[in-house]
Image (cartoon, grey):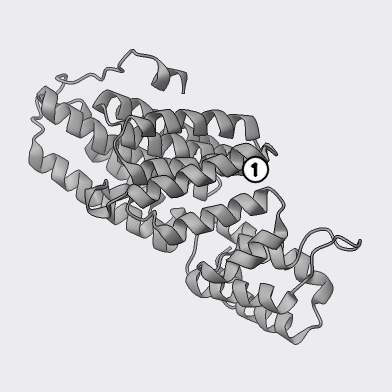
């Protein structure tokens, strides 16, 4: 992060190989970004991680050491940064956290060398998400704040929206309710300014529905269970949200209501999207809710969900 904020531009050893890199090579690499991103979104990081690692070793690394002019160099650094970012996220998603951090750091150096502020902001936000997942709220906040500064220079409202949405989650983890509210408001404002056709390919997934999901995750992180329960039906079901229908703490006059049927319904929708999933994070999120459902194991709806789980995700996880 310090290197990103510093004014020094990283350099790479171009010209040490006689291989000439041109626009056609860059186009192939961008097309592979789409392939790997789609695989990751649909199946999780486990399926394509080793294939992407081989592509980085066999294709991207030799290209970086090839011969190219400054324009091709910037394009090459940008696509290499995107591929390293995807690799970092796949490692993160597959519970290989330290390796993921290494790939994220390399992605950030390449993005800075390319001069692509939007991509740098996107990578910093991925790093903030990982820090959040690992339970490092201060680091998540620092990375999220750096992402905002990069997004402000990028000219990409969708990037700024995602950065602010993830920053809201970091503020929620740090128990800063006013800052969380400000970041949520800014995320909504930025997304209202966005025109998807003008946005980079990698950020076009960030729609109104995704923003709403991030708002619910922020409410979950802030332990605002009632807000999560109110918003959940409007968003594609996710196992993290299902947990809000079976809170970890029960009892007391202010305890939120338990809705076992709704939790199982949300989880059931998640399982239908998770067949073949290799995401360690996703499977563990489902298991967290399953453990909370254990006291209700004799209910028919819980038995039905457990049967579906054992015949799908359990065979993989």
Q: Residue furthest top?
A: 8
Q: Which residue occupies the foreground of this view, 195 or 13? A: 195
At label 1, counting other C-alpha atoms closer than 10 Å, the crowd grade (few under 14, some 14-19, many 20 or more) is: many
Across and down, in percent, residue 99 comes to: 49, 36
The residue located at (59%, 61%) in the rendering is 283
Q: Quadrant of residue 104?
A: top left
Left or right of residue 149: residue 78: left
> Residue at left 37%, top 34%?
151
Question: Mark 1 sits on what residue?
Answer: 172
The mark tally for this picture is 1
Instruction: Please give left or right for residue 152 compared with residue 94 in the image.
Output: left
Does residue 158 lie above or below 310 as drawn?
above
Q: In this view, does 138 lie to the left or right of 72?
A: right
Q: Which residue lies furthest to the right in this view?
A: 252
Q: Where is residue 317 in the image (x, y as percent from the top left)?
A: 58, 63
Residue 304 against residue 250 in the figure, above or below = below
- Counting from the top left corner in percent of width and height, residue 132 is at 60, 40
**Can residue 112 be seen from the camera position used here?**
yes
Of 144 and 110, nearer the camera is 144
Residue 129: x, y in percent?
53, 42
Vertical arrangement, residue 308 with respect to residue 190, above or below: below
Residue 134 visible in the picture: no
Q: Does dot 1 land on a helix, a strand or a loop?
A: helix
Frontmost residue, 248 versus 162: 162
Residue at horizontal 27%, vertical 46%? Answer: 200
Q: Looking at the image, which residue sits at the far bottom?
A: 300
Residue at 46% in and 18% down: 2
């Amino acid at each position: 992060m310090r290197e990103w904020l510093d004014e020094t531009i990283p350099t790479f050893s171009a010209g040490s190989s006689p291989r000439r890199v041109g626009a056609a090579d860059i186009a192939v690499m961008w097309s592979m970004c789409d392939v790997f991103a789609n695989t990751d979104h649909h199946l999780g990081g486990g399926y394509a991680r080793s294939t992407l690692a081989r592509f980085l070793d066999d294709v991207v690394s030799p290209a970086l050491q090839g011969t190219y002019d400054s324009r091709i160099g910037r394009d090459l650094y940008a696509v290499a940064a995107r591929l390293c970012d995807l690799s970092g996220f796949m490692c993160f998603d597959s519970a290989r956290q330290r390796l993921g951090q290494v790939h994220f750091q390399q992605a950030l150096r390449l993005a800075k060398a390319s001069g692509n502020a939007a991509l740098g902001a996107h990578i910093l936000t991925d790093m903030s998400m990982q820090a959040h997942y690992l339970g490092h709220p201060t680091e998540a906040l620092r990375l999220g704040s750096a992402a905002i500064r990069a997004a402000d220079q990028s000219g990409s409202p969708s990037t700024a929206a995602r950065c602010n949405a993830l920053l809201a989650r970091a503020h929620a983890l740090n128990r800063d309710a006013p800052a969380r509210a400000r970041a949520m408001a800014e995320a909504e404002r930025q997304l209202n300014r966005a025109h998807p056709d003008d946005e980079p390919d990698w950020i076009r997934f960030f729609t109104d529905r995704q923003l709403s999901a991030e708002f619910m995750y922020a409410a979950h992180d802030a332990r605002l269970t009632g807000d999560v329960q109110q918003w959940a039906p409007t968003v594609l079901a996710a196992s993290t949200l299902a947990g809000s229908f079976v809170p970890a703490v029960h009892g007391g006059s202010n305890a939120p209501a338990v809705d076992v049927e709704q939790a199982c319904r949300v989880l059931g929708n998640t399982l239908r999207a998770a067949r073949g999933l290799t995401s360690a994070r996703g499977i563990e999120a489902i298991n967290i809710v399953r453990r909370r459902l254990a006291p209700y194991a004799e209910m028919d709806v819980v038995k039905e969900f457990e049967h579906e789980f054992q015949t799908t995700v359990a065979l993989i996880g």
